[in-house]
Image (cartoon, rainbow, N blue to C red):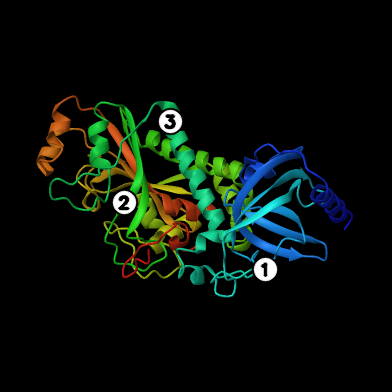
Amino acid sequence: MFGARCLLRALRSCSSAPCPRHRPAARVSVRGALGIQSANGERVKVQGWIRSVRSQKEVLFLHVNDGSSLESLQVVADSSFDSRELAFGSSVEVQGQLVKSPSKKQNVELKAEKIEVVGNCDAKAFPVKYKERHPLEYLRQYPHLRCRTNVLGSVLRVRSEATAAIHSFFKPSSKIKVPEENFFNIPVFLTVSGQLHLEVMSGAFTQVFTFGPTFRAENSQSRRHLAEFYMVEAEISFLESLQDLMQVMENLFKTTAMTVLSNCPKDVELCHKFIAPGQKDRLEHMLKNNFLVISYTEAVEILKQASQNFTFTPEWGADLHTEHEKYLVKHCGDIPVFVINYPLALKPFYMRDNEDGPQHTVAAVDLLVPGVGELFGGSLREERYHFLEQRLARYLDLRRFGSVPHGGFGMGFERYLQCILGIDNIKDVIPFPRFTHSCLL
């Protein structure tokens, strides 16, 4: 109350006496304002949306958020401002002085000189209600509005930070980013992978990657599938062992997660606290331990000896299903596990033949992670011309002219976000989920 009275006296003294000509207010983000350690009355302008309004007899308190941080900036104003238009959800522009806050809950607050309502919001009609914790299933009905909630805001900030971290991971090693194809002068189909383009580029640059949308006609309503999702793909030349490839995959997982934890601690904390209790400890467990490695053959034996009844009976030569993948991760102590050396008949022609008969496997690898199952899929590529000639005529020129041992992988970005945040449904980690029978926006 003492702080409110002091602010009120300051506001009234400015309104009753001629004020000196002000310099133009500098526009700052909410995150930028909150990060100022010693505010000394700097004149600033903040634009955003009202998250809460609290009116006292002589002072009006607003919390304004612009999406740059989970925390909102407290705005303190004279009660003479018309509070009827200052409703939850309304967009505003506030100009005033940034001052040290007397409250222990925030370091600074904005002493308002001018508040302009840019866009009104009818709080009663607005599907997102003040102080109500909406279920994620409810919010999926409003893909155009759900990004204004705390939880989706946090997820999308983490998504943005993870995107930047992935680019940063590849950048130091002079890896080349291959652009997505955008021109359709000939009949084309929706891409399911950028691997072909990456293999072409890896013949000139030793390490290349791409990161963009992928489209697949997944006729599935599951928590793990979308028709449109983002994929990180990499191709590395002169790579001769699965161990080297797995090391890159593990480093990418851990480096990106550590960057997100460092730069978005409050957003991650919100998800771990309210959506996935216990996920913080599970993630720390993943990050501090080396990922495990088992062969496909060992995985099948583990599944056969399991006391659990599976919908799909595990047997050598059959693909691993989600129920198998999740069981294997639990069996391995909830540590991510690489499964390597799959049967040749299960994998595409471009994966390198291990020449191991009689079972005949290829140098393929999947990374299985807690709560999700398969996150990465990769392999050494078959660089030997005569092996490909026996299987398929495709890629042959790439192998005839300066071929080198190489390998690569793909990682589903949304599944990665599910893994580190503990979010159960993949539809809640992408801005506009599109899947079979649903394309709301």
Q: Farthest residue to the front: give it.
A: 18
Q: Which of the two labelled residues, at mark 3 and mark 2, occupies the earlier sequence position?
A: 3
Q: How far apart are the two marked residues, 3 and 2, measured between alpha carbons?
A: 22 Å
Residue that carries the numbered disc 2 in the rendered image:
214
The spot of residue 440 in percent (x, y) is 37, 67
Task: Please identify, in this view, whether the residue under mark 2 or under mark 1 is nearer the observer.
Answer: 1
Residue 15, compared with residue 26, is above or below; it is below
- Spatial CA span between label 3 and label 1: 51 Å
| Circles 3 and 1 in contact, beta carbons < 8 Å | no
**Residue on which the image places disc 3:** 171
Where is residue 327 drawn, in percent x and y?
A: 45, 60
State the residue at coordinates (28%, 59%). Answer: 318
Kind of residue sitting beneath label 1: Arg
**Image height check: is 134 above or below 117?**
below
Dot 1 surroundings within 10 Å: few (below 14), some, or many (20 or more)?
Answer: few
* Side of 187 relative to 341 (left or right): left
Count neighbours of disc 2 (C-alpha within 10 A) and say few if under 14, some if 14 to 19, many if 20 or more.
some
Q: Earlier in the sequence, mark 3 or mark 1?
A: 1
Identify the amino acid type marked 3.
Answer: Lys
Between residues 435 and 184, which one lies in front from this camera angle?
Answer: 184
Q: Secondary structure at mark 3?
A: helix
Q: For mark 2, give the secondary structure.
A: strand
**Residue on which the image places disc 1:** 84
Q: Quadrant of the N terminus?
A: bottom right
> Closer to us: mark 3 or mark 1?
1
Question: Where does residue 251 sit, x and y in percent of width and height?
Answer: 47, 37
User: Whole-percent x and y of residue 92?
Assistant: 61, 56
Q: Is residue 382 visible?
A: yes
